[in-house]
Image (tube, coloured by chain):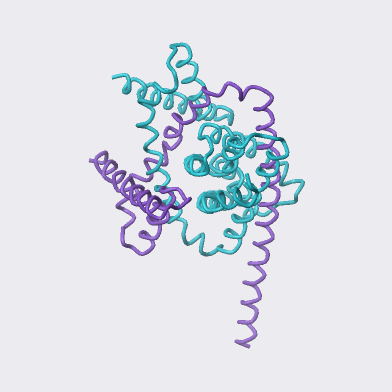
Chain colours: A cyan, B purple
Amino acid sequence: MFAICMILLTVVTYFMMTKIYRRYSYSLLIPALTATTLIIIILLVLHIPYKSYMIGGQWINSLLGPSVVALAYPLFKQRRFLMNNLFPILGGALVGAITGMVSIGILSKMFGINHTLILSLIPKSITTPVAIEVSKGLGGNASMTIVAVMIAGIFGAIIAPTIFKFARVHSPIGRGIALGSASHAIGTSKAAEYNELTFSMSSVTMTLCAIIGSFLGPIVVWLFHI
Amino acid sequence: MKFLIIILQICMLYLFNFVGNIVHNFFNLVIPGSIIGLILLFICLCLKVIPVKFIENGAGFLLRILILFFIPATVGIMNYPSLLSIHGALLAIAVLLSTIISIAIAGIAGQLFERKAQKRKDDRECSKCSQSV
């Protein structure tokens, strides 16, 4: 009974916040942020610990795996597009994935961030469901990873136009690759504001980076003795 | 009816996830089982072992409400109030800097690779022209 209540709480909050987001479509109102905050407030007010919440929450959580598998579908639909631009997409995604992981590894070591936290930060440029799995595999903390993924996504989408101007990235392909590899799904929705090509580029790159990232994560951790 | 199809197709995706996890455990791989499932499904779709219509409704449905599935894990940050301290700020700064660096480098690299690919394509077309002449 309690489990069902927690599932309902999550689902209802999610749909409510999605509705609000659709109406105002302001990037700080993304449901992942607002729904989470609201649920945390409700749990704190009702004195329900996270462990009890997860009795229901784990059921929703268990759909993450199939959702990651489902990413094969958009990738398959865009396979012609991918094959036609194989070299720039594959090269760009590889460079993007490596830069993202190596730079966060070096920066967080410089800042003296603790071990488990660094492991949680490594997959921060990957789309959330995959980032969670990669983080668990590395021995990181899933919740911390999500926070990092959100920061990378929201901030990346906001700052990207400025960076493109300074770095003189004008091609839709370059922009799409940058947004998809550094800011995953949130960056991809930003890419949709440019044009169709940038959007397709970004979404293919996002999926490829998720696959590349899950291979690369353990290698980066091993190389840098994190 | 549509609802039933979606449920069945999600079961199909579950199956791939399950097989992925078995492969993951059997070979003791570091790559998550769901990613192995993704790669397997992509290969099956390309080889037409599984027609797209066997998964498209289920996959579309899951991806439309994807955010819902990671909300429970996100709520877990309530166990880490320390994120609101200096430690959390450092974490955020590290992620911000790394994001700036990777957007710039990936953008420049992508643009460069695109030009190279374009040049190669042009060269090939040119050599074709000269052959025909």
- Given the current orientation, which residue lies at the most extreme right position? A166
Left or right for B8, reference A225 = left
Tally of numbered discs: 0
Quadrant containing the N terminus of chain B is top left
Can you give x and y, in whole percent of width and height, for residue B119 in the image? 67, 70
Residue at the (42%, 41%) spot, across then down: B63
Work out whether residue A107 or residue A45 is closer to the camera in this orientation and state it. Answer: A107
Residue placed furthest toward the left: B1
In the rendered view, tell whether residue A171 sits above or below residue A138.
Answer: below
**Residue at horizontal 37 percent and vertical 41 percent from the top:** B61
- Which image quarter: residue B60? top left
The answer to whether A62 is drawn above or below residue A52 in the figure is below
Check the image and name the residue furthest to the front. Answer: A225
| Residue B29 image position (x, y, % from top left) | 45, 53
Image quadrant assignment for residue A124? top right
Using residue B10 as the reference point, say whether residue A201 is left or right of it.
Answer: right
Residue A68 image point, x, y percent: 43, 45
Which quadrant of the figure has residue A57?
Answer: top left
Which residue is painted at 66% across and 52% down in the image?
Answer: B106
Give left or right: position of A174 versus B30. Answer: right
Picture layout, residue A17 above or below residue B7: above
* Residue B78 position in % (x across, y down): 52, 22
Where, quadrant-wise, is the C terminus of chain B in this rendering? bottom right
Q: Nearer the viewer, residue A48 or A94?
A: A48
Q: Say which residue appears at 69% left-offset and 31% top-offset.
A: B90
Left or right relative to A52: residue A167: right
